[in-house]
C-alpha cells in the first residue's frame, strides 16, 4: 500500500530511505492512473517574473494534456493598475474569467478557466497570461483537472479582498449545488500566489 500526495498521471520514481541514511531509487517503477468516475488533479505548471519584472511569463505543462479536461489559471500580481486582458495557450483553448479580478493593497488576483480542453495528447501545452499593460511581478499557476462536466464545470464562485493589514483570508460563503464537487481556491500575498 502506498499513501502519497496527488501525482501527475504517469510513471513516478520511488525512493526508499533507510534509518541509517542509505537510500535507493527505482526510476519509473510506480504508475499513477486516475480511476474513472472521479475528479482528479492531473498536473500543474508555474511561471513567475522577478519582483521588478513585467513580462508575461509562459507556464508550460510538463506533460501533454488530455482532451476534455479542465485548466484552472490563478494569476496574482503586485499592482492594481494592470488588468488581465486575456489568457491563451498553444492549443487554442478558450479561457474565461471565473469571477471579477480582485484588488487588495497593491495586489491583484484573477482566476480563469478553460473547459473541455483540446488536449492533443502529444505536445505539452503552454499557457500565457496577457495584461493590458506591464504588470508588476506576475505569478501564474495552472492546474489541470479531469473528471469534471466538460460543458459546465463551474457551479459557484466567491471572492473577496482585504485592503487592511488584518491578514484575513476569507472569501465569504460559496455554496455548491451538487455533492462531490471540486473546490479551487487562490490567495495572493506579497510574495506569491
Image (tube, grey):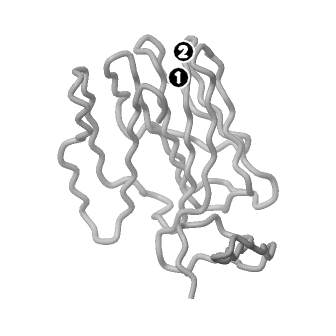
Which secondary structure lies at badge 2? loop
Local crowd size for mark 2, using a 10 Å CA cut-off: few (<14), some (14–19), many (≥20): few
- Vertically, is 132 above or below 91? above
* Residue farthest along the left direction in this orientation: 173
* Residue farthest along the front direction in this orientation: 20
**Residue shown at the point (53%, 78%) measured from the top left:** 3
Tell me the tag on residue 163.
none
Question: How many numbered discs, if any?
Answer: 2
**Residue shown at the point (53%, 63%) measured from the top left:** 41
| Residue at the spot of label 2 | 132
Residues at marks 1 and 2, CA–CA distance in whole angstroms? 5 Å
- Vertically, is 95 above or below 124? above
User: If the image is split into quadrants, where does the N terminus sit?
Assistant: bottom right
Q: Quadrant of residue 181?
A: bottom left
Q: Looking at the image, which is closer to me, 116 or 42?
A: 42
| Residue at the spot of label 1 | 85
Q: Whole-percent x and y of residue 182?
A: 39, 61
Q: Looking at the image, which is closer to me, 53 or 179?
A: 53
Q: Whole-percent x and y of residue 177?
A: 24, 62
Q: 79 left or right of 4?
A: left
Q: Whole-percent x and y of residue 46?
A: 62, 41
Q: 125 left or right of 157?
A: right
**Residue shown at the point (69%, 49%) measured from the top left:** 61
- Vertically, is 121 above or below 157? below
Which secondary structure lies at badge 1? strand
Q: Are marks 1 and 2 in contact (CB under 8 Å)?
A: yes
Local crowd size for mark 1, using a 10 Å CA cut-off: few (<14), some (14–19), many (≥20): few
Q: Looking at the image, which is closer to me, 149 or 60?
A: 60
- Nearer-N-terminus badge (1/2): 1
Q: Whole-percent x and y of residue 44?
A: 60, 51
Amino acid at each position: 500500500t502506498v499513501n502519497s500526495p496527488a501525482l501527475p498521471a504517469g510513471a513516478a520514481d520511488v525512493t526508499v530511505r533507510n534509518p541509517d541514511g542509505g537510500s535507493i531509487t527505482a526510476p519509473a517503477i510506480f504508475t499513477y492512473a486516475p480511476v474513472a468516475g472521479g475528479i482528479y488533479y492531473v498536473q500543474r505548471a508555474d511561471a513567475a517574473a522577478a519582483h521588478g519584472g513585467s513580462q508575461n511569463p509562459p507556464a508550460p505543462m510538463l506533460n501533454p494534456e488530455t482532451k476534455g479536461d479542465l485548466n484552472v489559471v490563478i494569476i496574482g500580481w503586485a499592482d492594481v493598475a494592470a488588468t488581465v486582458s486575456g489568457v491563451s495557450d498553444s492549443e487554442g483553448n478558450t479561457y474565461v474569467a471565473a469571477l471579477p479580478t480582485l484588488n487588495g493593497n497593491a495586489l491583484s488576483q484573477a482566476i480563469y478557466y478553460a473547459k473541455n480542453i483540446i488536449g492533443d495528447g502529444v505536445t505539452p501545452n503552454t499557457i500565457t497570461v496577457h495584461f493590458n499593460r506591464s504588470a508588476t511581478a506576475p505569478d501564474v499557476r495552472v492546474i489541470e483537472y479531469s473528471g469534471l462536466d466538460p460543458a459546465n464545470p463551474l457551479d459557484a464562485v466567491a471572492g473577496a479582498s482585504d485592503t487592511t493589514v488584518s491578514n484575513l483570508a476569507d472569501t465569504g460563503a460559496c455554496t455548491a449545488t451538487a455533492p462531490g464537487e471540486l473546490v479551487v481556491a487562490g490567495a495572493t500575498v506579497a510574495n506569491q500566489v
